């Protein structure tokens, strides 16, 4: 099962679209999902570890996979390639 972490910010105008996409994909695919605000200590640690400088940023199985809102097709492809 893939592990998806979405780094977000309360001031980000694109983050709601990214949240919606990943929540929709959870209905079709089985993966663990969490959202972390980049302004929190956990968010800062992840951002530093992955050199994230913009949100939304999607980390799948410990690898920074997308910055920005991915297309549904790209997100589905990434999930199918990174299962387990």
Image: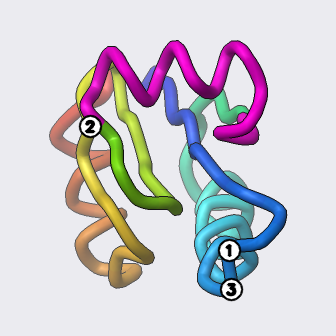
Q: Residues within 10 Å of mark 2 (few under 14, many from 20)?
A: some
State which region is magenta.
35-51
Residue 41: where, in percent of width, then height? 72, 15
Residue 33: where, in percent of width, then height? 67, 34
* Label 3 residue SS: loop
Residue 76: where, in percent of width, then height? 34, 63
Can you identify the residue that label 1 sits on? 12
Q: Which mark is residue 13?
A: 3
Q: Which mark is residue 38?
A: none
Task: Between label 2 and label 3, give the one nearer the viewer.
Answer: 3
Can you identify the residue that label 2 sits on? 64
Which image quarter: residue 42?
top right
Could you tell me how many numbered marks the image carries?
3
Determine whether 20 is above or below 31 in the image: below
For the residue pair 62 and 11, the one nearer the viewer reads as: 11
Disc with the residue nearer the chain's start (2 vs 3):
3
Disc with the residue nearer the chain's start (2 vs 1):
1
Which image quarter: residue 69?
bottom left
Measure the alpha-carbon separation of dots 3 and 1.
Answer: 4 Å
Q: Residues within 10 Å of mark 3 (few under 14, many from 20)?
A: few
Decide if residue 11 is on the left or right side of residue 70. Answer: right
Determine whether 36 is above or below 23 in the image: above
Measure the alpha-carbon separation of dots 2 and 1.
Answer: 18 Å
* Label 1 residue SS: loop
Q: Residue at x 52, y 61 (%)?
A: 56
Asked if residue 29 can be seen in this view, the reply is: yes
Q: Which residue, as the protein is rendered here, is positioned at the far right?
A: 10
């Amino acid at each position: 099962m893939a592990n998806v972490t979405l780094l977000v910010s309360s001031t980000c105008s694109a983050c709601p679209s990214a949240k919606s996409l990943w929540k929709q994909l959870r209905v079709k695919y089985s993966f663990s999902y969490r959202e972390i605000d980049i302004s929190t200590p956990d968010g800062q640690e992840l951002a530093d570890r992955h050199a994230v400088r913009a949100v939304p940023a999607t980390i799948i199985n410990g690898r920074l996979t997308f910055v920005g809102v991915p297309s549904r097709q790209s997100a589905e492809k990434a999930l199918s390639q990174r299962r387990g």
